[in-house]
């Protein structure tokens, strides 16, 4: 595990489009099953890119996704998690970011439930296993 990723508030998650173009997004990430995980919507582009190409990179970043010049770049593979594993990943993220999760994600889930929809947060997750 990487100490700088463990302590980072935000991590730049880079996955690749079909043509190889990298797409970087800042995400909340938490240690999970000898790797790291974050929640997302199952129909997100991140999920589609990971299913097509599991090669990813991560590095600590700011809330806006800006990576410091001295931030370590980690390569790894990603997998999409559903069901119980996604719920466990959600709990790991929730543990690392309790206040932010309660304010942003839980509120969104409650709002969706009131409108007759189903909560989306935590229904899907992406796990990143770093290369050795």
Image (cartoon, rainbow, N blue to C red):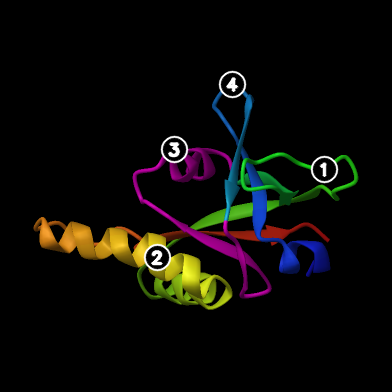
Where does residue 42 sit, x and y in percent of width and height? 36, 51
From mark 1 to mark 2, how far is it between C-alphas? 28 Å
Tag 1 and tag 2, C-beta contact below 8 Å: no
The residue pinned by badge 4 equals: 19
The residue pinned by badge 3 equals: 45
Judge whether residue 30 is colored magenta: yes
From mark 3 to mark 2, how far is it between C-alphas? 24 Å
Instruction: Residue at 51% x, 38% y: name it.
Output: 49
Residue farthest right in this picture: 70
83 is higher (above) or lower (below) than 20: below
Image depth: mark 4 or mark 3 in front? 3
Where does residue 98 sit, x and y in percent of width and height? 50, 75
From mark 4 to mark 2, how far is it between C-alphas? 37 Å
Tag 3 and tag 1, C-beta contact below 8 Å: no
- Circle 1 SS class: loop
Q: Which residues are magenta?
A: 28-53
Judge whether residue 49 is colored magenta: yes
From mark 4 to mark 3, how far is it between C-alphas? 14 Å
Where residue 103 is drawn, which disc sits there? 2
Residue farthest left in this picture: 116
From mark 3 to mark 1, how far is it between C-alphas? 25 Å
- Choose top left, top right, bottom left or bottom right for residue 67: top right
Instruction: Residue at 60% x, 46% y: name it.
Output: 26
Which mark is first along the chain, 2 or 4?
4
Q: Is residue 91 left or right of residue 33?
A: left
Count all numbered tags in the image, as a single digit.
Answer: 4
Q: Is residue 114 left or right of residue 105?
A: left
Say whether residue 16 is visible.
yes
Where residue 102 is drawn, which disc sits there? none
The residue pinned by badge 1 equals: 68
21 is higher (above) or lower (below) than 78: above
- CA neighbours of label 4 inside 10 A, class few (<14), some (14 to 19), many (20+): few
């Amino acid at each position: 595990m990487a100490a700088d990723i463990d302590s980072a508030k935000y991590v730049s998650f880079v996955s690749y489009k079909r043509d190889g173009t990298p797409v970087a997004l800042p995400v909340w990430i938490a240690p999970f099953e000898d790797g790291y995980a974050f929640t997302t919507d199952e129909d997100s582009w991140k999920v589609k890119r990971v299913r097509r190409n599991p090669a990813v990179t991560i590095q600590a970043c700011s809330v806006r996704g800006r990576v410091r010049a001295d931030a370590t770049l980690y390569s790894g593979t990603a997998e999409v998690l559903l069901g119980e594993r996604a719920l466990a990943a959600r709990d790991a993220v929730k543990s690392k970011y309790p206040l932010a999760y309660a304010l942003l994600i839980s509120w969104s889930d409650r709002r969706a439930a009131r409108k007759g929809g189903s909560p989306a947060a935590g229904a899907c997750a992406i796990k990143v296993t770093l290369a050795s």
